[in-house]
Image (tube, rainbow, N blue to C red):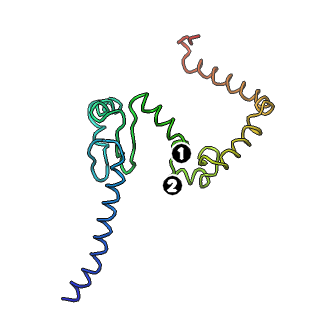
Amino acid sequence: MAAFNYLFFILVLPLLLLFLKTKRESKNSYRLLPPGPWTLPIIGSLHHLTGTDLPHRKLRIMSRRYGDLMFLQLGEQPTVIASSREAVKEITKTHDLKFCTRAVNLTSRVLSYDMKDVVFAPYGEYWREIRKMCVSELLSFKRVQSFKSIREEKIRSLTSGSHHHHPKERLSN
């Protein structure tokens, strides 16, 4: 029995220390974040956005309490909400390079060939090169004009389709 207790102590103590270390590190990283409502373990702050009011109205109410910048934990995703024009302007002006790249997750990696397409590529030299290539090859005047007949045909089919769906209603100008 003593051997079991000793083995249990050897296995549990490192796990307990690791848990306490990560908990302390996460608290230190959240100290630099703006204030926000309390969170629950799995859903975070999502329960604050439910109820009879619409979510954007709940956010307005919370911004009056926590200020123009507030921290919400949306599920497992930490989120900073800016509620005023001045706060958004300051964030985008001083931290623009941090916000110019899309968030990386498994879905975006799978859909974008490991972040290699022009939509999901992180900002940098590679993104600038593929953007230049798209502008020069796909969006050149000559290339856009070559698809003019296709665009006109699509416009005709869309506008004629709207007459078939609502024959009695008049379309506005």
Q: Position of residue 108 (x, y in %)?
A: 54, 50
Residue at numbered disc 2: 106
Reply above or below: 56 against 162.
Answer: below
- Residue drawn at x 55%, y 10% as measured from the top left: 170
Q: Quadrant of residue 61?
A: top left
Q: Position of residue 123 (x, y in %)?
A: 60, 46
- Residue drawn at x 68%, y 27% as measured from the top left: 154
Q: Quadrant of residue 14?
A: bottom left
Residue at numbered disc 1: 102
Question: The N terminus is located in which quarter?
Answer: bottom left
- Residue drawn at x 30%, y 32% as measured from the top left: 58
Reply above or below: 126 against 145.
Answer: below
Viewer-side residue, 11 vs 138: 11
Spatial separation of the CA atoms under disc 1 and disc 2: 12 Å
126 left or right of 120 in image: right
Amino acid identity at mark 1: Arg
Viewer-side residue, 112 vs 171: 112
Which one is in front in this view, the residue at disc 1 or the one at disc 2? 1
Q: Residue furthest front?
A: 94
Viewer-side residue, 157 vs 34: 34
Q: Position of residue 110 (x, y in %)?
A: 56, 54
Q: Residue furthest left?
A: 1
Amino acid identity at mark 2: Leu
Reply above or below: 83 against 2.
Answer: above
